[in-house]
């Protein structure tokens, strides 16, 4: 059993040392809590659990604290993929729900498993999700000052459970100030993908991740015999050719984990019950 989570990017130039420490501590805490949850739950349940904790933490740009789009509204995207059943579910540009990843989880049982915009919100309401604003004053201030902070704070988790099953979950508030209707990578197979061999969650510039098909490529390479390390390296090498900006966390069926970023520094933490690895 193993787990690795990410919380987007950290930038020395626009975030303080205190924020770095806060992110390291929060990621360690959430990785440990989620690993404990994994003892008695499936990989699918665990990645949702971890991403919900990350969405609830104001440090990240997903759920609470999501970025505000160019028209002043928050629209969030999240997706879930079960590597064993090969089912993918997600919401794209959903408004006013507290935890988009939980809506994606409920959608798993449907034939129509990826819903967008108003349809996603109607489905959430019908399934008992209350109206909830995830806006925090700091984001409104950034929006009003038109300060593009980069907004690289998507969250994600990949996990391997005791029965050898893999799952991936990813959730984002977007990149901030985006055109209304923009679809990021986070609820696509470029940003979140898993099968029985490998599971991957990405963060970074959605357009670059989609152009590079990052998560799907890494998973397919591992399926075809690459080591997880080589699969990640080759995929990031190809990302360089388009000057892409991304980070990814990955886990294979043997519990090997990998993480890479094209630009420093993706924030991540992994935990296996004994050892932590946390971004520096
Ligand atoms: N991938 C997200 C997007 O482009 C942003 C991020 O990872 O922070 O919407």
Image (cartoon, helix red, strand yellow):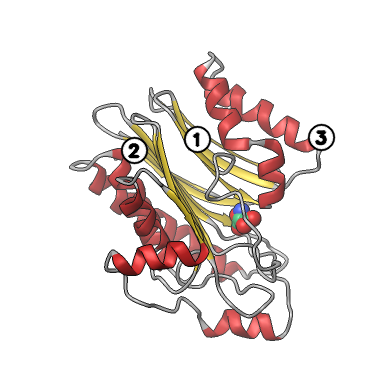
Mark carried by residue 241: 3
Residue 161 horizontal/vertical position (percent): 28, 34
Q: Residue furthest left?
A: 40
Compared with residue 231, is residue 104 higher up or lower down, i.e. above or below? below
Mark 3 is surrounded, within 10 Å at the Cα level, by few (under 14), some (14 to 19) or many (20 or more) other residues, namely: few
- Ligand 1 is found in the corner quadrant, namely bottom right
First of labels 3, 1 by sequence position:
3
Foreground mark, 3 or 2, reads 3
Compared with residue 125, is residue 25 higher up or lower down, i.e. above or below? above
Q: Which residue position holds label 2?
A: 272
- Left or right of residue 52: residue 228: right
- Left or right of residue 158: residue 216: right
- Left or right of residue 263: residue 230: left
Question: From mark 1 to mark 2, how far is it between C-alphas?
Answer: 14 Å
Residue 152 horizontal/vertical position (percent): 63, 59
- SS of the residue under disc 2: loop
Compared with residue 28, is residue 160 higher up or lower down, i.e. above or below? above
The answer, for residue 216, to whether it is visible in the render is: yes
The answer, for residue 280, to whether it is visible in the render is: no
Asked if disc 3 is less than 8 Å from ligand 1, the answer is no
Residue 159 horizontal/vertical position (percent): 37, 38
Number of residue marks: 3
First of labels 3, 2 by sequence position:
3
Residue drawn 78% across the image and 37% down it: 240
Residue 79 horizontal/vertical position (percent): 45, 49
Foreground mark, 1 or 2, reads 1
Corner quadrant of residue 173: bottom right
């Amino acid at each position: 059993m193993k787990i690795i989570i990410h919380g987007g990017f950290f930038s020395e130039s626009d975030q303080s040392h205190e924020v770095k420490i806060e992110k390291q501590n929060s990621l360690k805490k959430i990785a440990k809590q989620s690993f404990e949850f994994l003892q008695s739950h499936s990989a699918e349940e665990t990645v949702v659990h971890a991403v919900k904790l990350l969405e609830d933490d104001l440090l990240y740009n997903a759920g609470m604290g999501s970025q505000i789009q160019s028209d002043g509204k928050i629209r969030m995207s999240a997706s879930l993929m079960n590597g064993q059943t090969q089912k993918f579910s997600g919401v794209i540009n959903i408004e006013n729900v507290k935890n988009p990843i939980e809506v994606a989880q409920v959608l798993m049982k449907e034939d129509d498993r990826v819903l967008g915009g108003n349809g996603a919100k109607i489905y959430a309401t019908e399934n008992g999700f209350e109206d909830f604003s995830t806006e925090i004053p700091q984001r409104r201030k950034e929006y009003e000052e038109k300060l593009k902070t980069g907004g690289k704070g998507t969250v994600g988790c990949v996990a391997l459970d005791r029965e050898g099953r893999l799952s991936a979950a990813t959730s984002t508030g977007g990149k901030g100030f985006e055109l209304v209707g923009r679809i990021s990578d986070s609820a696509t197979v470029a940003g979140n993908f898993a099968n029985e061999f490998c599971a991957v969650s990405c963060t970074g510039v959605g357009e670059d991740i989609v152009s590079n098909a990052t998560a799907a490529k890494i998973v397919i390479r591992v399926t075809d015999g690459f080591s997880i390390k080589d699969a990640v390296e080759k995929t990031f090498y190809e990302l360089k050719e388009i000057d892409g900006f991304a980070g990814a966390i990955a886990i294979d069926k043997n519990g090997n984990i990998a993480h890479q970023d094209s630009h420093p520094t993706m924030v991540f933490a992994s935990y296996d019950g004994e050892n932590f690895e946390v971004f520096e």
